[in-house]
Image (tube, rainbow, N blue to C red):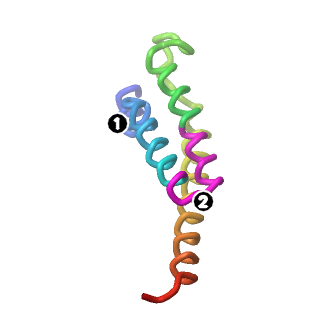
Amino acid sequence: MSTLLRFMSPLSVHPWLAVAIAAGLGFLARRVRLVWLGMVAGVWVVYAFYELSIHYHLICSRECDIRLDLLLIYPLLASITLLGLIQLAVTMWRRREGAPAR
């Protein structure tokens, strides 16, 4: 069961991917000046610390193979990230439409 969970969840095997996602979203939020996207990046940072602490056995012992918490965390992360990216796309579209023609 542990191997199957690790195969299905690259973020639990490689928690530094969550740090990279948070950095990318934070960069976009700063560049475009979107508060919501910045908050999404902050949630990814919190998740990255949580996942790193589990990966290095700071929260959970080595017997922590079955990760039922991911059934709640992954849909939450996916939905707020999707909302943030939709807001980014709408904001970019509005700025492009409002910009003077060249």
The relative height of residue 29 versus residue 96 in the rendered view (above or below) is above
- Quarter placement of the C terminus: bottom left
Residue designated by label 2: 83
For label 1, the crowd category at 10 Å Cα-Cα, with few meaning under 14, some 14 to 19 and many 20 or more, is few
Q: Nearer the viewer, residue 36 or 100?
A: 100
Between the C-alphas of marks 1 and 2, the distance is: 27 Å
Whether residue 56 sits left or right of residue 94 in the image: it is left
Q: Tell me the kind of residue under disc 1.
A: Phe
Tell me where the magenta segment starts and ends, as one range. Answer: 30-44
The relative height of residue 60 versus residue 92 in the rendered view (above or below) is above
Is 33 covered by the magenta stretch? yes
Q: Secondary structure at mark 2?
A: helix
The relative height of residue 41 versus residue 84 in the rendered view (above or below) is above
Residue designated by label 1: 7
Assign the magenta stretch its main secondary structure.
helix
Q: Tell me the kind of residue under disc 2.
A: Leu
Q: Secondary structure at mark 1?
A: helix
